Each structure stands twice: as structure tokens, then as C-alpha cells.
Image (tube, rainbow, N blue to C red):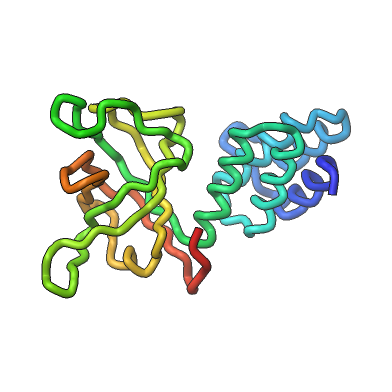
Amino acid sequence: MNVTELLESASLLVPQEVATENDISVEDVWDHLVHDEWQIALNLLEELGDGLPLPLTFWEQLAEAAAQLGLERSRAWCHWRCSEIRNGMIRADLTLRPAAEARRTTPVSGHGVLRPMWNIGNLSPTGSSSVSIARLWVEGMPDLEPGGRATVRLVPLTPAHWTHVRTGQLITMHEDRTVAGTAVVLEVHLPTRSAPTT
């Protein structure tokens, strides 16, 4: 499918009555598609999708459209949303330790590249702490400086490890044995059935 077909097909998956806080609706998307304003239409569809539990196909079509338009950031975000649907997502308020107190002295990439380990309260068979891996996306920022604080989205590598995680729980981020940051869980959305890992 070409860009127009992908965006038209994705827009059909958004309920007609849905609108964003700014009163953006599917009709606005169609207005931009009529005028071949594909990037604006794509951005509006991303915004509409942020507030809804839309199907995997919606995000796959947006990712393909973004790839065809050469919009790397949008492509990465749409693929990220596909991963959230498959593996679940945990939102958390993360504070990184300052560079003087931690191994990391450079910013954390905000767009899903980093796969840190997380102490979420699991134990190994010997009774010691066990960590679980989750990819990290920083909301609204290209990266997060040491000592910085931001809302992050985590996609678990193994969703079954995260089923006990609850809102308000304190979890710690690790890139080695030391604590790289602490986070308070804000939301937990795990897949309802087993899904392939990313």
C-alpha cells in the first residue's frame, strides 16, 4: 500500500465519535488527506491513537506510512506502540542518579534504544534479587540526563515477570550491579494473553 492508502486504512480503525482534548477527530485527518498533507494526517492519527486502545494493525500501518515518508521518529514511535500492544507497558516516574554517583555519565536515549535491567521485586531460585529487562522510552524528551527526572514507558522483554507490578510501587533501574535510577510506577498495562516478545 502507498502512504495515502495506509493512512486511510488506519483512519478507518478510529471510531468516528472520538476526539482529542483539542477536538481533533478523524474528519480532520480526512481533510488533510484530501490535500495530500500526509505528515499532518499521520501526526493527527498518532495523537488520536494515544488516547485509545486501538488494534495492532493501526500502529503497523502508521509505522509503514512513516517509513515511506522518511519520518524516523514517527516510525520508531509507531513500532514502539506495536511493542506495547504485544508485550504490555508500564509508565513510571523515573529519576536517574547524578553522574557523580553512578556509572552513567552520558544521557539515556529517549527513544527505546536502552534495555536496562529492573529490580521489580522478583527473586532468583536461591532467594536473591533477580532483575528483569524492559526497553525504555522517555516521554516528550529526546534523552534524559544523569540526575534528570521524566515520565518513561517500559516494555517488558518477558511480560510474565511483571504481572505482580502495581501502581505506586518503587522499582530500580540497573545497567550493572549498582542502581542507575529509581522509578515510581504510574500505570500498568500488561497483555491479556501470551504474546511474542520484541
Most extreme residue toward the right, as rendered? 34
Image position of 111 (left or right of 150): right
The quadrant where residue 57 appears:
bottom right
* Residue at image coords 40%, 29%: 143
* Residue at image coords 38%, 41%: 152
Query: Residue 94: horizontal and vertical position, in percent?
Result: 28, 39
Image position of 196 (left or right of 123): right
The quadrant where residue 149 appears:
top left
Reply above or below: 91 against 197.
above
Reply above or below: 163 against 17.
below
Reply above or below: 56 against 33.
below
Image position of 126 (left or right of 83): left
* Residue at image coords 41%, 59%: 157
Query: Residue 113: horizontal and vertical position, in percent?
Result: 45, 41
Query: Residue 52: horizontal and vertical position, in percent?
Result: 57, 51
* Residue at image coords 73%, 30%: 39
Query: Residue 32: horizontal and vertical position, in percent?
Result: 80, 31
* Residue closer to the observer: 50 or 137: 137
Label count reads: 0
The quadrant where residue 125 appears:
bottom left
* Residue closer to the observer: 7 or 47: 7
